[in-house]
Image (spheres, rainbow, N blue to C red):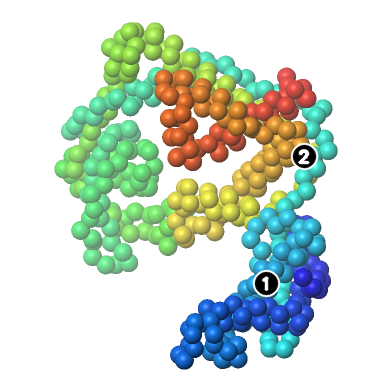
């Protein structure tokens, strides 16, 4: 395709190109679009496809020009990518398009290209595997968490204490207006479910008692309109429940699961903690290796990829619309780090032939099926239907890449 390309901007991964399509090429595209319409057009007095070209152009002129324009832009884009040897990282954008009768088609093409990740140094680094020991304190914390999950709540007539669960009717008055009817809430004292000043009111009351006085909202309250405001608050304490933890004994172990004794439960919990600690240690070691590689081989990352991943984080955490700008800024370093991580792993895998093969995936599926006591074909079909085969492929590739990196670097 005969087009003119002028580079207006080439900074980092950003390209801004001015494209001009000659009048002759535009005219040919319009003629081709007109002929296509002529074969399909249905006009009164003419058999299908037999209407004269001049009448077809007059009747469908705007549609013909639009069809020609779409074809021209698509063909020009392909020509630009091929001639300039560009690999777009995200959807290109067309700006400042001019398409006038008897004149060349001109537009600006804004493209963000994939980075060239060379990774000239991937060995000679020294990293340290974090400690994996699980102590008695961690074991006790996990056992306490299990007890807390099976705690019972019993009503008490006393004033509430930190850790108690309370039901309250809370009412406020806004800017001199009458006190609202109130709304019922259930919360645990001391867990930050109410602002401290309101918790102080609750702690002063007994079940059935009502306390009312002005309360000042914190300066860091999430709702900016309420920050620092002082307004009347009425708290009616409806009930108080106190937590009772089960005894840590053999009976508790049997209640938790298939454990004959407390010692058996402790052994299982410790093994689980050690397994988790080992995975966490491996994850931190992998990140150290990646940090070393990235530091030694700096490269730009596509802004489009970072923005896309940041948007995915916002959706995953269901960030409210009004909070999105702030959270997007906070998520950006995390997203950029993830993009760099993925590019390094992808580059090493392609260069060193470490990408997971179909045989690797089949073996992993067979292993999963064996652990489940299921048929491998059924497990494969289930994973394929759930869209998880790509996840398995990525996991195997990462394992190969990190095994390769650990073999070429010093792990203390």
Secondary structure beneath dot 1 equals: helix
Residue position marked by numbered label 1 in the rendering: 73
Answer left or right for 35 relative to 207: right
In the image, is residue 360 above or below residue 165?
above
Q: Evaluate whether residue 395 shows in this view.
A: no
Is 175 above or below relative to 97? Answer: above
**SS label for mark 2:** helix
Label of residue 117 in the image: none
The quarter of the rendered structure image containing the N terminus is bottom right
**Which residue is located at x 34 percent, y 54 percent?**
215
Q: Residue at x 57, y 30 (%)?
A: 361
Q: Residues within 10 Å of mark 2 (few under 14, many from 20)?
A: few
Badges 2 and 1: C-beta atoms under 8 Å apart? Answer: no
In which quadrant of the rendered view does residue 401 lie? Answer: top right
Of circles 2 and 1, the one toward us is 1
Any mark on residue 295, and which? 2
Disc 2 from disc 1: Cα separation: 40 Å
Residue at point 59% right, 77% down?
A: 36
């Amino acid at each position: 395709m005969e087009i003119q390309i002028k580079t207006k901007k080439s900074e980092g991964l950003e390209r801004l190109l001015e494209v001009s399509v000659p009048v002759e090429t535009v005219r040919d595209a319009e003629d081709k679009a007109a002929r296509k319409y002529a074969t399909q057009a249905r006009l009164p007095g003419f058999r299908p496809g037999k209407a004269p070209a001049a009448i077809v152009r007059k009747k469908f002129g705007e549609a013909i020009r639009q069809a020609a324009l779409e074809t021209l832009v698509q063909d020009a884009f392909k020509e630009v990518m091929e001639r300039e040897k560009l690999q777009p990282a995200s959807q290109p954008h067309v700006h400042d398009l001019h398409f006038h009768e008897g004149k060349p088609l001109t537009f600006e093409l804004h493209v963000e290209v994939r980075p060239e990740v060379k990774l000239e140094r991937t060995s000679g680094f020294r990293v340290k595997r974090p400690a994996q020991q699980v102590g008695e304190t961690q074991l006790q914390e996990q056992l306490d968490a299990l007890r807390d999950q099976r705690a019972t709540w019993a009503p008490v007539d006393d004033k509430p204490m930190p850790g108690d669960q309370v039901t309250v009717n809370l009412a406020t008055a806004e800017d001199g207006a009458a006190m609202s009817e109130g709304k019922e809430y259930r919360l645990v004292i001391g867990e930050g479910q109410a602002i401290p000043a309101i918790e102080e009111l609750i702690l002063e009351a007994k079940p059935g008692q009502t306390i009312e006085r002005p309360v000042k909202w914190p300066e860091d309250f999430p709702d900016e309109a309420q920050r620092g405001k002082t307004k009347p608050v009425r708290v009616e304490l409806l009930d108080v429940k106190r937590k009772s933890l089960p005894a840590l004994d053999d009976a508790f172990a049997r209640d938790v699961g298939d454990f004959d004794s407390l010692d058996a439960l402790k052994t299982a919990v410790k093994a689980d903690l050690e397994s988790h600690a080992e995975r966490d240690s491996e994850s931190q070691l992998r990140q150290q290796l990646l940090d070393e590689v990235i530091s030694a081989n700096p490269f730009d990352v596509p802004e489009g990829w970072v923005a896309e991943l940041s948007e995915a984080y916002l959706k995953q955490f269901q960030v409210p619309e009004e909070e999105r700008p702030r959270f997007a800024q906070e998520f950006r370093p995390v997203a950029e780090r993830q993009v760099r991580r993925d590019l390094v792993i992808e580059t090493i895998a392609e260069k060193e032939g470490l990408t997971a093969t179909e045989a690797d995936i089949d073996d992993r599926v067979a292993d999963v099926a064996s652990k489940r006591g299921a048929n491998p074909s059924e497990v494969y079909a289930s994973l394929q239907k759930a869209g998880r085969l790509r996840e398995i492929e990525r996991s195997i590739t990462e394992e190969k890449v990190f095994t390769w990196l650990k073999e070429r670097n010093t792990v203390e």
